[in-house]
Image (cartoon, rainbow, N blue to C red):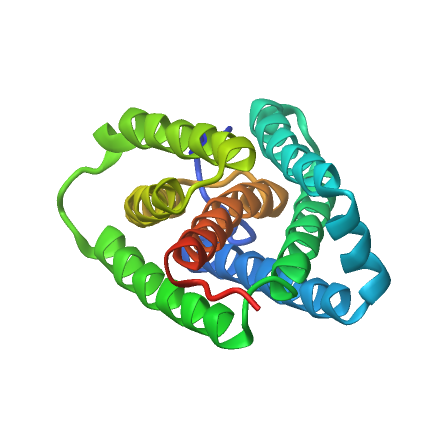
Amino acid sequence: MSFGTGQVGQSRSVTEPGEHDYLTYVFAWTCLALVLTAAVAQYVHTQASITNYFFDNRNSLLILWIVQLVMVYAVRRSARHLSLQVTALVYVVLASLVGVTFGVLLSVYTSSSVATAFGGAAGVFAGMAIYGWFTDFDLSGLGMYLFGGMIGVITASVMFLFVGGHTLNLIIGYAGVLVFSLFTSYDMQRIKRISRTRFSDTDSAHKLAIFGALNLYLDFVNLVFSLLRIMGGRR
């Protein structure tokens, strides 16, 4: 869940974005995605025709999930070749699709369960993000292990769709909390390092900020999903 820093300038002019600008972009894009996801989720939740469609066609939700995974994979593989406009568009579309998924889940889990999972995820995310920012311990070596853990969680989630099981669901939930908590610290430390580079122009800073925001956004969303598996009460 990490990216290269792209091209950086050899010197900084007055108009080049600095550390504060980059961090502002990252958190602004992260908040934008969360707000958009929440808005889409609320809309989908109030549209019985949409939620009923997914309940009547269970494979559609799986396809939607696969589309999101493919989009994340594709945008990362093509990171250096995408324009700022295309990167922003993909980011917005992805956040909207995640909102659709959440909208369906709002019809499955109780409102109190969703609120508890969201609050718990916010607390874990904030704590791990602060740790990632301030720790002197180099977390870069965790990258390959976290990626492997993420693949394990995804694989187990696909298996769960076919075999089910309360125990497996809890294992996936706890594993997800562990993996994406650590990913939050890992990604925040990487964002801190990138913020101290010299960006060639504002577009480059914005583009890298979107990738940084995407990482944080996915960390938070996956924490919510994982906690819902653990403490989610169904309607």
**Residue 119 falls in image quadrant:** bottom left
Residue beneath the point at 78% across and 43% down:
57
**Residue 179 falls in image quadrant:** top left
* Residue 129 x, y percent position in the rendering: 31, 57
Q: Is residue 121 left or right of residue 22?
A: left
Q: Residue furthest left?
A: 137
Q: Which of 221/156 is in front?
A: 156
* Residue 4 x, y percent position in the rendering: 45, 29
Residue beneath the point at 76% across and 58% down:
51
* Residue 55 x, y percent position in the rendering: 73, 51
Mark yes or no: residue 10 visible: no
* Residue 168 x, y percent position in the rendering: 37, 40
Q: Which of 217/48 is in front?
A: 48
| Vertical relation: 41 (above or below) 219 | below
Q: Is residue 30 left or right of residue 127?
A: right
Mark yes or no: residue 46 visible: yes
Q: Is residue 86 left or right of residue 225?
A: right
Give the position of the N terminus as an image quadrant: top left
